[in-house]
Image: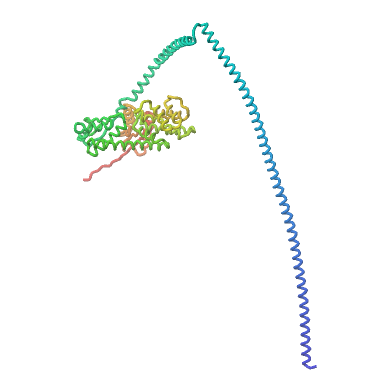
Amino acid sequence: MNTTTWIIILVAVILVDTLISALVAISIKKNSDAKKIGTAEDKARGIIDDAIKTAESKKKEALLEAKEENLKTKNELDKEIKERRSEVQRYEKRVLNKEEAVEKKSDALDRKENSLKSREEELNKAKEKVEQLSEQRIQELERISGLTSEQAKEQLLQTVEEEIKIETAKLIKEHEKQAKEEADKKAKELVVNAIQKCATDHVAETTISVVSLPNDEMKGRIIGREGRNIRTLESLTGVDLIIDDTPEAVVLSGFDPIRREVARIALEKLVVDGRIQPTRIEEMVNKAQKEVETMIREEGEAATLEVGVHGIHPELVKLLGKMKFRTSYGQNALKHSIEVALISGLLASELGLDVRVAKRAGLLHDIGKAVDHEKEGTHIQLGVDLCRKYKESATVINAVEAHHGDIEPESLIACIVQAADAISAARPGARRETVQTYTNRLKQLEDITNSYEGVDKSFAIQAGREIRVMVVPEQVSDDDMVLLARDIAKQIEFELEYPGQIKVNVIRESRATDYAK
């Protein structure tokens, strides 16, 4: 065999081997793919089976939940229906009961109406019978007495009149006796009140005002030619001008403090202006009146703001401002009313009452004093009339009327205002002291401080509300000053009676002096 043949055989063998290998590979791949397909199908069937099982279980759970929900809803509906039925039954029962009651009332009314008709008929018959008997009785009495009815009436009236005269005479004698017993007491009260209101020092201090002048030549200009200017001013203001030997001063006298204030402001304006003539005087008086009216309104508003009371009628606010110019035993009426209002508020707060009403009643309790010098009547009755006029509450009106015990208080607020008024009036320093008592207290104050060692001199200032003590610096050190002030204050508290508080001011001053030569 030649080479070519071997080559051909070799190629043929290779081809056959390649073919066999390919067939084997194809067979192996087919088997592998078949296995994979079978496995995937098995997995898919398993997944589907699981899904079916899960779906069945979910379906069962959903059906169970739906059944439970339906059952629950049914039970609730049954319960609600039952309640509605019971409620309807109750309403029906109530309606039936009301219908029965109405029927019973109707029957009763019918029976009552029938009974009243029968009784009315009986009464009419009885009335007719009584009238007949009365006429018969009158006729019989006239026959027996021999008097007509008119004559009998006249005789009876005469007898009654005589008896009344006797009883009246007895009552008059009793009242006269009682009046005589109370006459002395009432007279003493009237005298005391008159003395208190007309005390000399009180009248002197509360009925005059002093206007300073730049020079004594101004007095002649105020008087004017033949007294024209002073007469004009007095006639316009209603105030007396007293021009005496007092240097550079004119005294205004009048019992109306508002008029006196108008005159003071007008005169001060005229003095500053320098043009004093009747026309100018009238112009300045008008301006002064407007200023005083504005001042009165502002003072009233300030009082309400200070106390914290709002909603008071503007006319009452104006009257409160007028009380600034009114005093009682030397105590300013407006300051007194403010103090009573504040004390009333504090007491009401402690007792758990209405603080605003208490303050309102306290502020208005003496409102009648703003007009008692202009109108007839006591300041209590005038205050009550004003409060009623401007629609104050019944509680406030009763507090105003009862604060001096004229009537019985009807509320705790009235009792509080009564107590607050007494506290304010009785407080040390509230009512005017005599000059002698005042000067004696100041002298005692200075004597106490001068009795201590190291005190050089002392001065009571600010109406006795402060004592200024000058000490010798060589005898009293800075540390000793504190102890000295404390000791003086303790002795003043122990020995003296005084309103408010007294400030003890100890002063130590060291001076060094030399001369340049």
Q: Residue reaching furthest bottom?
A: 2
How many badges with numbers are in the image?
A: 0
Q: Is there any visible trace of residue 126 in the rendered image?
A: yes
| Image point (59%, 16%), residue name | 126
Residue 237 lies, in percent from the top left, at 28, 32
Q: Nearer the viewer, residue 226 or 77?
A: 77
Q: Quadrant of residue 35?
A: bottom right
Q: Quadrant of residue 192?
A: top left
253 vs 76, left or right, is left
Q: Quadrant of residue 111?
A: top right
Quadrant where the N terminus sits is: bottom right
| Image point (70%, 44%), residue name | 78
Quadrant where the C terminus sits is: top left
Residue 386 lies, in percent from the top left, at 40, 30
| Image point (49%, 10%), residue name | 149
Q: Nearer the viewer, residue 94 or 462?
A: 94
Residue 156 lies, in percent from the top left, at 48, 10
Q: Residue reaching furthest right?
A: 1
70 vs 352, left or right, is right
